[in-house]
Image (cartoon, rainbow, N blue to C red):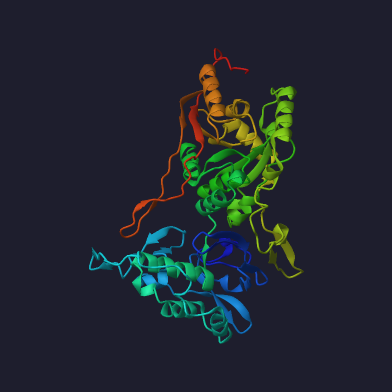
Amino acid sequence: MREGNSSNGRVTWEGCSVLLDINDGDRLVFARLSPAAKLKIGNKNCSLQPLIGRAFGTVFQVDTAPDGPCLSPAQVNVNNAEEIGDGQVNDELGDKVNVNSADEVRDGAVNVESRDNRALVDNNTAQSLTGEDIEAMRRQGARGNEIIEALIANSATFEKKTSFSQEKYRLKKQKKYAPKVLMRRPVARSICEAYFKKYPSKIGFLRVDTLSLLLSMANVSSNSDILVVDMIGGLLTGAVAERLGGTGFVCNSYFGQAPCSMDIVRIFNLSDEICKRILRSPISDLLSPKESSEQILQHDVCNVEGQSSDQISASASMVEISHSSENGISDIVTDNTEPVIRKAPKAGERAQKEVIDLWKENGFSSLIVAAPELDTWTVVKDLLPLLANSAPFAIYHQYLQPLATCMHNLQLGKMAIGLQISEPWLREYQVLPSRTHPCMQMSAFGGYILSGTKICSTANSAVPTE
């Protein structure tokens, strides 16, 4: 069952993909929900069955049940800092909403405490509760929150700490004894953030603000036909298809005979209507017959030599708990004779000749390129004529020099106007009471984007060969 067949896209269903955020970003896991799927948290294996039928954005907590550890919805009270732990709660899209601590804020005024941690000595004698006592509480069926409260009650120095230190202590114990799992919806933003945090090389170090800028500069809008060269695992293809929303087409083009990996597209939970709009076509089918065979051979050699093993399986290192066959998703239609099985459309089917001829006649609405392994100018030189006149294009690259060379050649050939190279810049802030400052660990590099508008080529224009 796909999201397009469900009555409410906000609720999970069996077979859908989810992004599990464990302990506020300490661990990110992509999983496909099924009754047999399990998630290992610490030394406990928890079934993902309770996640089916729940709303995206639900926070689960590891509890002890008679048949073993399980995930149960956590009771989150946004007005109680003791239950929030880190002073933040996550909404459905995974954005962080700041919550004011009840101990720090009274009637809009921040209380200034005179306590400090100068007199505290960490000699492992402040806690009177032993490991044996905690194990005994677990055997008696104590929940994680009860163990945390017992640790606080038996700590000789907890009341002497500042409110910030108390909050940090609660969060540390919560991650150990009562880990929480946030079930996020796998959309372009959350998928890009997860890959960029854990495996940035598999998506070409494409940051989420750079991805959004790519889609905006390429004017990805309803009923557009977008030509995409995606060598970053299918993230760009899935983001374009998600924005189109089942209108227009996404043509995932590639050089040679072997298409690039599109594993990330299957994480998006795209509906059947959107999947039908994602097509594949080799560049040789899109080019006019005037294209020389030597030029096509040059692309083939470049693609074979440049494509690494990491690029072939872009999401191999990401954990998927339960694997399901893509061909196994089907609908059964019954009539008076015997049932007929109709398979659900699969994203990335080869484009038909009629559709390709229509693209050749009218041209594509825009072009987006994210191919770190290929020469940028060689790719743009061949694909730009496939666009309609006045169509925008946006090319992403991790480094500046390939885009600068491409921009120079486009200017010499008078092939485009409005050329500019943009460097996205993003600074993330922590916003908490009395603790508002830039985050301590941020990415200072977001790559570069070359954008412009294709113009009608004239007979006097000379296209550079080098």
- Does 317 sit above or below residue 121? above
Residue drawn at 44 percent across, 75 percent down: 126
- In screen coordinates, is 365 left or right of 435? right
| Residue at the extreme right of the image, as rendered | 338
- In screen coordinates, is 341 left or right of 131? right
x, y percent for residue 384: 58, 28
x, y percent for residue 263: 65, 50
x, y percent for residue 352: 69, 41
Residue drawn at 70 percent across, 30 percent down: 302
The N terminus lies in quadrant: bottom right
- Does 171 sit above or below residue 413? below
- In screen coordinates, is 274 left or right of 436? right
The C terminus lies in quadrant: top right
* Front-most of residues 202 and 326: 202
| Residue at the extreme bottom of the image, as rendered | 140
Residue 39, by quadrant, is bottom right
Q: Can residue 423 be seen in this view?
A: yes
- Does 81 sit above or below residue 346? below
Q: Is residue 390 visible?
A: no
x, y percent for residue 225: 56, 40
* Front-most of residues 206 and 149: 149
